[in-house]
Image (cartoon, rainbow, N blue to C red):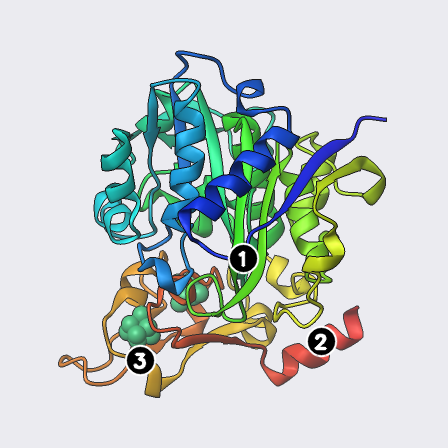
Amino acid sequence: MHKSPVVLIRCESYELQAVSAAVERGLSLLGGIERYILPQEKILLKPNVLAGDQPERCISVHPSVFRAVAASVQAVTPHVTFGDSPGFGRPATHLNRAGMTAVAGELGIIQADFENGREVAAIGSQSTNKFVLANGVIESDGLISISKFKTHQLTRLTGAVKNQFGCIPGLRKAEYHVILPNAYEFANMLIALNLLIKPRLYIMDGIWAMQGNGPRGGDKIPMNVLLFSPDPIALDAMAARLIDLDPLILPTTKPGANWGLGVYTDEEIELLGDPPQQFYNKDFQVKRTPVEIVATLRGVSTLKNLISPRPFIQSLKCVKCGICVSACPVVPKALSWMDENKKMPPQYTYSRCIRCFCCQEMCPEGAIEIETPPLGRLFNRFCR
Ligand code: SF4
Ligand code: SF4
């Protein structure tokens, strides 16, 4: 039986020496980085940067993890680039704030073009027949995906599979939320995207993870682990198991296995490195229920509006920055200012809201939370 290797390496701090040793050990247990890239190949590093928050907030991949991986790749090929496309704003700004640009400057790594892109035909996808990929992705020979161990309200965890969504430039990402509001169709699209890009290797920064109201507004928590695998489904499944979450709760697991992107059962995964028991955290705050049945309905029906989980703003935390309004992809927007002076937090028009949670994902203050209306809780109880 084919088994996918997943390596777990203990690392308790972002001190560069410790991280470099952990990355080196993780890669060597997979047979060395040279098993995945060739000399002279153009290799793109794709760290999860999201909205470019300071490293100490543990929202983005930590710069020392990025640096350690980059140095390993540079030992094989001099042609290394890096990039990520945030949900709003310019990639250069976010990469700079997250500390990646400084590291890249020291190592002589060039920033790839993630602002512009071209259409590329999708492979065997039911959800879309083409993707627009960032030029930096198209122009590379191979990609190394560096994700962050974090919660996500739509996909439960944002990990190895979801990280490639940032290969779609700028606001084009929002279009996928509009045309694929069904959470499982969105997951299928992510699988198709990974099958198209075929990253060579997936690495996850879980030294400090994010629990609760992730991917930007949650609480940081030490998990003390770096994960490595050439299989993103296996890597995400292992991350889920570390927090006592059934991998099948992740909407990407089953389609990922069905379409041959990876495997997820214990029998199909070869665990290497440090024993998983030392990382288990059953109290990790994550939504432990499957994607709500009603959230799989297309568009915004009256039923969906009445019973599906919805975002709401905690007024006391809101600084009225308007990022959530900019992030809302529907037209007309489902979140808008009710007063010209913007003295009050933006307000939702739920009848337009497709429940993509882009507003919650982008709020820098963690002021947007997700609640299930009482009718929805009742509905879910009887439909499970
Ligand atoms: S992004 Fe967050 S802080 Fe900014 S206006 Fe929206 S809810 Fe308020
Ligand atoms: S209000 Fe928020 S959840 Fe609703 S459509 Fe806009 S961004 Fe998505």
Q: Amino acid at mark 2?
A: Phe
Name the residue that disc number 1 marks: 12
**CB atoms of marks 1 and 3 within 8 Å:** no
- Where, quadrant-wise, is the C terminus in this rendering? bottom right
Q: Residue furthest left?
A: 341
Name the residue that disc number 2 marks: 379
- Mark 3, secondary structure of its residue: loop
- Mark 1, secondary structure of its residue: loop
Q: Position of residue 176 (x, y in %)?
A: 44, 45
Tell me which residue sits at (21%, 49%) in the image: 93
Q: Is residue 199 above or below residue 380?
A: above
Of the two numbered discs 1 and 3 on the same chain, state the one appearing first in sequence: 1
Q: Position of residue 43 (x, y in %)?
A: 40, 23
Q: Amino acid at mark 3?
A: Cys
Say which mark, if any, is on residue 318.
Answer: 3
Q: CA distance from mark 1 to mark 3?
A: 33 Å
Tell me which residue sits at (45%, 71%) in the image: 351
Q: Is mark 3 within 8 Å of ligand 1?
A: yes
Q: Amino acid at mark 1?
A: Glu
